[in-house]
Image (cartoon, rainbow, N blue to C red):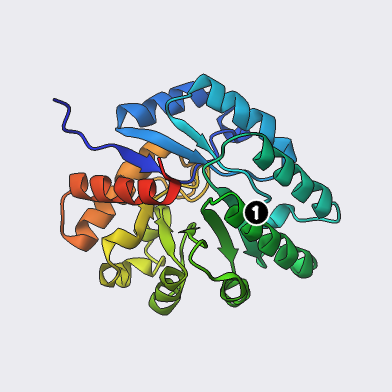
Amino acid sequence: MNSTPIITDTHTHLYSEEFDQDRDEMIQRAIAAGITRFFIPAIDAAATQSMYDLEKNYPDNIFLMMGLHPTYVKDNYLDELAHVETELSKRKFYAVGEIGIDLYWDKTHLKEQQIAFKKQIQLAKQYQLPIVIHCREAFDEIFEVLEEEKSEDLFGIFHCFSGTLEQAQKAISYNMKLGIGGVVTFKNGKIDQFLSQIDLKHIVLETDSPYLAPIPYRGKRNESSYLVNVIAKLSDIYGISAEEIAAITTQNSKDVFGI
């Protein structure tokens, strides 16, 4: 019997052009390391076909989301939202994501980002799907929308969580799991200092590859196999085995995504 627990990467951009040279090898490295479930966030309409191609090549491992990423909310955002709505109506997705608000790069489309975030939350409720939230320098703005939309059928993942303990507790109060990845291994990442106060039932694992590679790969291209470094750090933080971390977080991902 294979006792190795299944490991789930709840957030990876496997279709990114950064993997164009070695995508299959990179995915095989992850699978060899026990990471066999990959949840793929959408960015905008331009990424859709490459996501479908990925799913076709790895039907047992790849699970797709549909959504409009906040940094891709531009003047044509209504067309992009129409695309999201059309795709959701056509086939099965496992989440609406990644969606949210990002004020790190550019604040000019804040109003449109808020409208797009709210609209996509409503679509997620309509299709009884979780949401996957992208938040960068926008906790207050995100929480404001979540407060307006909170309900039994609002749930999901606060992707790449990098806030304070108080913000973590607030996110959890809106039925969100915390997506934990490479940041937990960073010296200045801060979340490692309080994470042990958060019950592991609220945590899912992610890489956000090709971004945010964990130590010792920081600054290099991230990939899903590096999730084992995140697990090792969480094993230290929680004082339980890597196997237990893998098993619990994969179960948490099943509770969110329904698969």
The C terminus - image quarter: top left
Residue drawn at x 42%, y 48% is: 206
Residue drawn at x 73%, y 52% is: 72
Residue 189 place in picture, x, y as percent: 41, 65
Q: Is residue 21 visible?
A: no
Q: Which of the pair 105/188 is nearer the observer?
A: 105
Residue drawn at x 52%, y 20% is: 57
Residue drawn at x 59%, y 34% is: 18
Q: Is the residue 92 above or below the residue 189 in the image?
A: above
Farthest residue to the left: give it. Answer: 1
| Label 1: which secondary element | helix
Amino acid type of disc 1? Leu
The N terminus - image quarter: top left
Q: Which of the pair 213/177 is nearer the observer?
A: 177
Horizontal placement of 51 versus 237: left or right?
right
Q: Is residue 23 visible?
A: yes
Q: Which of the pair 95/46 is nearer the observer?
A: 95
Residue 125 picture quarter:
bottom right
Horizontal placement of 88 versus 110: left or right?
left
According to the picture, the residue beneath numbered tag 1 turns out to be 123
Mark 1 neighbour density, 10 Å: few (under 14) some (14–19) many (20 or more): some
Q: Is the residue 232 above or below the residue 61 in the image?
A: below
Q: Is the residue 238 above or below the residue 143 in the image?
A: above
Residue 131 picture quarter:
bottom right
Q: Is the residue 209 above or below the residue 240 in the image?
A: above
Residue 56 place in picture, x, y as percent: 55, 21
Residue 98 place in picture, x, y as percent: 59, 51
Q: How many marks?
A: 1
Residue 90 picture quarter:
top right
Residue 85 place in picture, x, y as percent: 72, 46
Q: Which of the pair 69/125 is nearer the observer?
A: 125
